[in-house]
Image (cartoon, grey):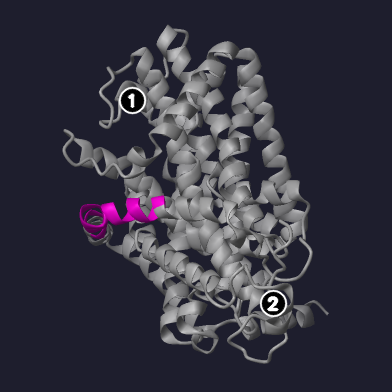
Amino acid sequence: MASSNQESALATFIDELDPVIFLFGAGLTVAFISIFAFDPQLAADLMWGMNETILGYINWFVLAVMFLLVVFLLVLIVSPWGTLRLGDDSPEFSYLSYFAMLYSMGSAAGVVFWGPTEALLHYSEVPPLYSASAESSEAMVLGVQYSLFHWSLTPLACFTTLGIAMGYFAYNYEGVPLRVSALLTPILGVDNLDGNLAKSIDVVAVFATIGGVATSLGFMGSQFVTGLEYQWGIELGNAGIILVVTGMTLVFTISLVLGLHRGIRRLSNFNVSLLVFLIAVTFILGPTMFLLVLGTQAIGGMVSDFISMSLFTGAGAEGGTQWANDWTVFYWAWALSWSPFAGLFIARISRGRTLREIAFTGIIATSMASITWFVVIGGTAVWGQHVGLMDILNPVDTHGEEVAGFVLFEAFPFGTVLMLLFLVLVTSFFVTSADSATLAVSMMTTGGEENPSKINRLLWGLLLGATASVLMIIGGIEALQASAVVTGGPFALVCLIAVIGLVKEFSGKHGPLLLQEETRLIGSTDDRSTPTSATEADDD
């Protein structure tokens, strides 16, 4: 009986595969791991060469496209286009679960990781866009302001834009698979989505997803290993890195196998609850009134300086270009490397919702959660450093950014408990992201299956963990950062194509201002190049 079930599972796995996308995506990933494993120097030279090319020649393009995505989504929220829906079905999840999953699969793991650290780094070395003195009162505000900028609207915009593009064409057009290449529908047409160009987009999306998520897994593993060594003197070495990464891979794979409802949804709800708890505890025990004032100033500064911060390439400022590349461009490229899977996951859970609701949740609601975390956690760290209550910068200089959270929470009552909860939070957020990524890659390598086989999901989970382990052991954090830029940079062009396609679609004969009767008639035609269902523009 067990043998029969195994044969059935294997048959399902083989039948659902898109052989081109699967073989090229898996092959590219395995080749990448192999080069790093057998010739680290060659791999490093290749990666850093591509990294320097991207940063040196298209950094302006990455900044401009990411800014455009924010503008596009804000327009979508307030325009009649926002009333369009993804398909005709009712939403699959309650709004709170929907928000929790959307937030957890995105940049939340990075938000938690950098929360205690980034504002401090900008406080000690003020970004060259500003002329404030380092470690001054003004630098405190600017430090928090820049961390809010890096972790709110803009990185979330590429996830949300691709999610809307994939979901709109997959759910509103007949014959469009739920894959990254779905966003090419208005450009290629439905009948050409099995062509070489569409499949190439899906293959690159698979590789970018593995690289981007492996970067995050490496960061989280590094935080775990470095934190244990710094706080409790437990040295794990390379074997420990493999052990930690393997453990995280096992946890997210188990959650993934449990499925979207029993695994990812429940874990996402837990993540948001624990995030709120740590914010509340820190806000109450920390400098409450100071945080209210600091947060108001930092948010106001981000809003008023948003355009200049978004388009700052560093040209004309001493050390400005290097700073912009090391911080903003790296962050945007990292987010772009996540955009294929994050967008696909957003599309998967957004069926039945309006574009306005998706855009608002994707960049406004999620930004509010991240902003609150950075104001409270980052603001407390900056305040503690400034008034001399705690010294976080010296341990960070010595041991790395990974230790900031340990130093911060150690200064609180029940510090050990808070430190452990902090570790649980950053790990559980990453587990949810890895779940979502592996599910998305499994969907990409099939015919757009919304529920791929367990074998498919397990295989990609193992490849993801292996990639992170190899990068961490051989190249360290620098290799992880370079891989994020290399795999994510090209997706700035994909996001731009998605926006052009959506504007073309919404502005044409299938725009949101069609009368209800015209929309119904269009949906009833047999033409495969027209939507099978469109949305009534009557509510959001």
Which residue in the structure is indicated by mark 1? 397
Residue for point 33% across, 50% down? 63
Q: Would residue 509 be counted in the magenta stretch?
A: no
Going by the numbered disc 2, the residue's amino acid type is Thr
Proximity of marks 1 and 2: CB atoms separated by less than 8 Å: no
Instruction: Indicate the secondary structure of the residue bearing disc 1.
Output: helix
Q: Look at the picture and state if 201 lies above or below 132.
A: below
Name the spot of residue 52 as percent of width and height, x first. Answer: 22, 54
Badge 1 crowding class, 10 Å Cα cut-off, few under 14, some 14 to 19, many 20 or more, is few
- Observer-nearest residue: 102 or 352? 352
Quarter of the rendering containing residue 435: bottom right
Residue 429 relative to residue 486: left or right: right
* Picture coordinates of residue 308, whole percent (x, y): 33, 39
Q: Earlier in the sequence, mark 1 or mark 2?
A: 1
Quarter in which the N terminus is drawn? bottom right
Q: Horizontal placement of 311 versus 262: left or right?
A: left
**Residue 239: x %, y % from top left:** 46, 46
* Residue under the point 55% across and 47% down: 363
Question: Position of 474 compared to 207: left or right?
Answer: left
Residue 396 can be seen in this image: no
Residue 37 appears in the rendering: yes
Residue at the spot x=43%, y=63% of the render?
A: 495
The Cα–Cα distance between marks 1 and 2, rounded to whole angstroms, is 60 Å
Q: Nearer the viewer, mark 1 or mark 2?
A: 2
Q: Which mark is residue 519?
A: 2
Q: Residue at x 43, y 57 (%)?
A: 337
Stretch of the chain drawn in magenta:
50-67
